[in-house]
Image (cartoon, rainbow, N blue to C red):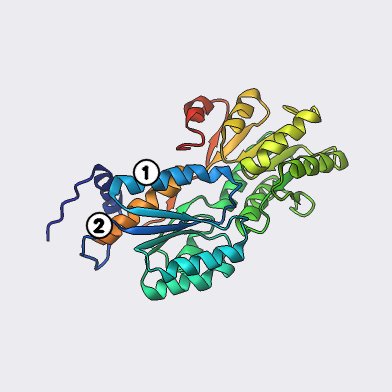
Amino acid sequence: MKKIIKTTSAIVLAGIATAGAIMAPVVAQAADERIVMISHAPDSDSWWNTIKNAIKEAGDHVGSKVEYRNPPTGDLADMARIVEQAVATNPDGIIVTIADYDVLKGPLFKAKKKGIPVITINSGTHQQSEDLGALLHVGQPEYDAGYGAGKQAKKAGVTSFLCVNHYITNPASVERCKGFADAIGVDLDGSMIDSQTDPTGIEKKVQAYLRKNPNTQAVLTLGPTSAHPTIRALDKMRLSGKIYFSTFDLSNEIAKAIKAGTINFAIDQQPYLQGYIPVMALTLYSRYGIIPSNNINSGPGFINKDNIELVEKLAGEVR
């Protein structure tokens, strides 16, 4: 049966999908699909604003309704309850982060049992996504990203570091720190702090660690939540530009720090793609039974002084 895809966005994604697609026995062409995205992010995490922009624009482009839900404090048990609530409403698709496989597998197996298509994003591994019965994973292999960052640091002579982990209850965050530690050849024990999310608290904890460990050569932060206070901590300690500093993700403040030489590079996982692609893929799956057959790595990419001007204006919106 011949199918006509009328929207430009659908045409573009159809090309991506059919380049390595699997066809499911879904032939009904639905309209106004309802898709629910559930993240692990607390309300205070501004990095997720880019993903929120992406799901809204993707939904507008294809005529799907996309709802964003999250645990306000980042509590993973609360996230699991939100997933269960979403499954109970029988949406046309669910997009979810695998913040903790063991916590989320129960609710997500219920989605699989009910035949609700799921795409995982951001946190988690391809294998975990497959085990949960998800159609696709769009994200960044976190250990590999940390390892890649560590390799760059090792080239610069770094043999010790501090990982400022503001979300230590998320196993993926520890994977980032572990990858960096393995790359430079050190044990992660003693090199990672549980900074939590209060900006003043993070700043004080970073200062305390560096005073106690004055020979620390590098700092790794895991996103704007921990990067911004760390920038201030280094400024106050007169260590800006003297200590090797890398961070995950991008923000306007991080971009300025890269240009100033405070931050050596940011690890970019392209959050806009993590929001946009799953909405488009679930819509195509609902209407035409098409889904990409391969997982999609949106990162890691590395942003430094050489390329910061190309992406700086997009920070917080589509990058």
Residue at image x 81%, y 39%? 207
> Quick check: 198 left or right of 64?
right
* Residue 88 at x, y percent in the picture: 43, 71
Judging depth in this view, the residue of 39 and 296 nearest the camera is: 39
Residue at image x 71%, y 42%? 199
Q: Within the image, what quadrant is residue 237 found in?
A: top right
Under tag 1, what secondary structure? helix
The amino acid beneath tag 1 is Glu
Q: Within the image, what quadrant is residue 162 found in?
A: top right
Which numbered disc flags the more N-terminal residue, 2 or 1?
Answer: 2
> Quick check: 76 left or right of 126?
right
Residue at image x 63%, y 50%? 176
The amino acid beneath tag 2 is Ala
The correct choice, above or below, for 48 with respect to 105 in the image is above
Cα distance, mark 2 to mark 1? 17 Å
Locate the N terminus and report the quarter of the image it occupies: bottom left
Q: Residue 31 carries which label?
A: 2
* Residue 293 at x, y percent in the picture: 34, 58
Label 2: how many residues lie within 10 Å, few (<14), some (14-19) or many (20+)? few
> Quick check: 169 left or right of 50?
right
Q: Residue 57 carries which label?
A: 1
Is residue 223 visible in the rendered structure shown here?
yes
Judging depth in this view, the residue of 309 and 214 nearest the camera is: 309
* Residue 141 at x, y percent in the picture: 53, 52
